[in-house]
């Protein structure tokens, strides 16, 4: 039983706080920027998100704010979220009920990929194959992710098969059905982007998987039993041992 009886969705809050803390440990965060959100009602319009100006390493389950994508007065609240968080995450949760969880960071290797003239990630290994036919690239960056830019990005994710948006000149955005699934994808995308960039640095030809094998591997990742949940469970166990404050 948590001690914050006035707060709802405690398990979701705890999961989200854990991955904020872990993202900081992995150095995939950026100052007090970037945002993770999770929808808590059936149509996806009400969602939890990190408070404005709080470092990922200091996020707690109770500090997450709950806002409504359809409430035009959200930015007038005393605890209003960051304007770009509202613009990007609000637009996605408003338009895409299947995007239960949305994670956006400027992690180093994903952002290097987003800075290349060709920001596609070829299936050159098992990890990069996870995103085969499940990724889109935004080639039309229009400035910071205020409401118009957020709505444009949301439209790129309309196909339910797409889980990953490489935001050209910007960073990475991942969606999923749960905190565990979405963070697992984010983690693996950063790993895959690093592998690809290091492979490019050799100047040697890439070993690109045939399309049929890449799609087969992506489907195997989609169906891999319990993997993302186990990943999050272990993250929480490690935090419980040396940083239990996340669950407060």
Image (tube, grey):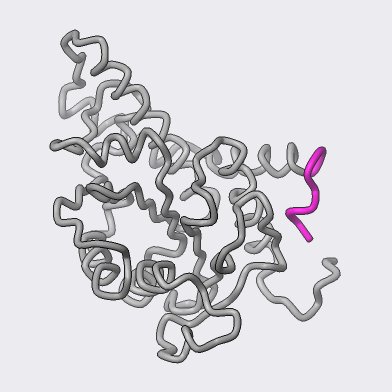
Quarter of the image where one finds residue 16 = bottom right
- Give the side of residue 161 with respect to residue 140, left or right: right
Q: Is residue 245 magenta?
A: yes
Which x, y percent locates residue 243? 78, 44
Q: Vertically, is 139 above or below 97?
A: above
Query: Which quadrant of the figure contains the N terminus?
Result: bottom right
In front of the other: 205 or 82: 82
Q: Residue at x 25, y 63 (%)?
A: 153
Q: Position of residue 232 (x, y in %)?
A: 61, 43
Q: Is residue 75 left or right of residue 5?
A: left
Q: Relative to 39, does residue 32 appear above or below in the rendering?
A: above
Residue 54 position, x and y percent, is 61, 61
The quarter of the image holding the C terminus is: bottom right
Question: Who's the residue at 14% across and 36% down the image?
Answer: 118
Q: Dividing the picture into quarters, in which one does residue 226 lie? A: top right
Q: Between residues 10 and 214, which one lies in front from this camera angle?
A: 10
Q: Is residue 203 above or below residue 174?
A: above
Q: Is residue 129 left or right of residue 107?
A: left
Examine the image and state in which quarter residue 40 appears: bottom right
| Foreground pick, 213 / 189 | 189
Lateral position of residue 98 relative to residue 247, left or right? left
Number of callouts in the render? Answer: 0
Q: Please tell me which residue is depicted at 19% across the width and 15% down the height of the picture.
A: 206
Main SS of the magenta part reads: helix
Residue interval drawn in magenta = 240-248
| Residue 65 position within the rendered picture, expressed as x and y whole percent measured from the top left | 60, 73
Residue at (85% x, 69% y) in the render:
3
């Amino acid at each position: 039983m948590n001690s914050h009886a006035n707060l709802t969705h405690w398990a979701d809050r705890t999961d989200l706080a854990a991955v904020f803390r872990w993202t900081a440990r992995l150095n995939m965060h950026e100052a007090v920027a970037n945002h993770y959100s999770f929808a808590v009602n059936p149509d996806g319009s009400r969602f939890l998100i990190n408070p404005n100006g709080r470092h990922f390493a200091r996020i707690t389950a109770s500090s997450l704010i709950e806002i409504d994508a359809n409430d035009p007065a959200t930015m007038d609240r005393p605890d209003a979220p960051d304007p770009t968080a509202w613009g990007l995450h609000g637009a996605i949760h408003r338009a895409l009920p299947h995007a239960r969880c949305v994670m956006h960071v400027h992690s180093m290797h994903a952002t290097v990929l987003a800075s290349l003239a060709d920001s596609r990630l070829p299936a050159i290994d098992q990890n990069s194959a996870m995103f085969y036919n499940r990724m889109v690239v935004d080639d039309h960056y229009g400035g910071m992710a205020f409401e118009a830019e957020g709505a444009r990005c949301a439209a790129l994710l309309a196909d339910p098969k797409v889980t990953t948006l490489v935001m050209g000149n910007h960073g990475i955005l991942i969606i999923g059905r749960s905190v565990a699934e979405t963070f697992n994808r984010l983690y693996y995308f950063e790993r895959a982007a690093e592998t690809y960039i290091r492979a490019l640095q050799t100047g040697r030809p890439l070993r690109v998987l045939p399309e049929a094998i890449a799609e087969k591997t992506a489907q195997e990742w989609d169906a891999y039993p319990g993997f993302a949940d186990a990943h999050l469970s272990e993250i929480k166990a490690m935090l419980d041992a040396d940083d239990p404050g996340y669950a407060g």
